[in-house]
Image (cartoon, rainbow, N blue to C red):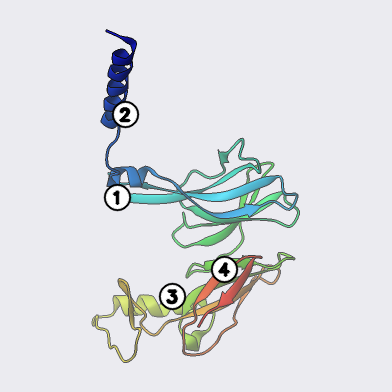
Amino acid sequence: MNKRLMFSAALVIALLSANAQKRAFTIEDLYRVKGVSSVSLSPDGKTVCYTASSSDLKNQKSGSDIYIMNADGSHAKALTEDGKSSSAVWSKDGKSIFFTNYEKGTAQIFRMDLTTCETEQVTDYELGIGSPVISPDERYIAFTAEVYPDLGADAKAIKARMEKKEQGPVQAHIADKLLYRHWTSYNDGRCNHLILFDTQTKTYKDLTPGNYSLIFVVGGGNHLSILS
């Protein structure tokens, strides 16, 4: 067998082997891919924290945890392992991070000391919080929540009314305006409002009172935009 024939045979074998390894991308492959979001750079620019999301197709579950790594991409490690943590941002001194966790049933803000890895709960809003933004001096936390307009930011009163409706003998919904139903839930008279939490006085205030819902988006520079 001459050299040209040997080379051709080797090339054919290599191509057949490569084609045998190729296959279509499946739903199982998709679920094995981890998503990265909420990337936050430390004040000194040396460290990055981020949210990594994963899914379990077999058990039909998904979760997310907080990770930290050097800015060059080295030494990545998980700071949480409960699958219920996300949206981490750095403290102003770079020694701790604020993040959202819903292990206790509702989403709340926690603070983790990066030296000791000890955490403390910052908010205790019974309805849970959404799209949190922390002020530069770390005194205030703005977030979104679905409230009854006439009850403002009074989470206990809102929760009591919701429970009364759920336990009532009549389970009916009257749709008198759009959008009354969103995805798989009913608004039931509640509106999406912007709430401000004062970490010193431990008080909550409705910043957007009124019988209407607003859409909020967290943008760059740690600010929150009102769309409508």
- Compared to residue 182, the image places residue 19 above or below, namely above
Residue at coordinates 55% horizontally, 87% vertically from top-left? Answer: 209
Pointer 4 residue = 218
The number of callouts visible is 4
Which numbered circle lies on residue 60?
Answer: 1
**Looking at the image, is mark 2 or mark 4 earlier in the sequence?**
2
Rounded to the nearest angstrom, the CA distance separating label 2 from label 1 is 33 Å
- Closer to us: 75 or 200: 75
Location of residue 164 (image quadrant):
bottom left
What is the CA distance from the residue labelled 3 to the residue labelled 2? 60 Å
Query: Looking at the picture, which amino acid does disc 1 mark?
Result: Gln
Q: Secondary structure at mark 2?
A: helix
**Please, is residue 22 above or below residue 105 in the view?**
above
Distance from label 3 to label 1 (Cα)? Answer: 29 Å
Gap in Å between the C-alphas at discs 4 and 1? 29 Å
Q: Going 63% across and 46% down the picture, which residue do you hit?
A: 118
Query: Could you say where residue 32 lies in the image, as x and y percent from the top left?
Result: 37, 42
According to the picture, the residue beneath numbered tag 2 turns out to be 18
Amino acid type, mark 4: Val
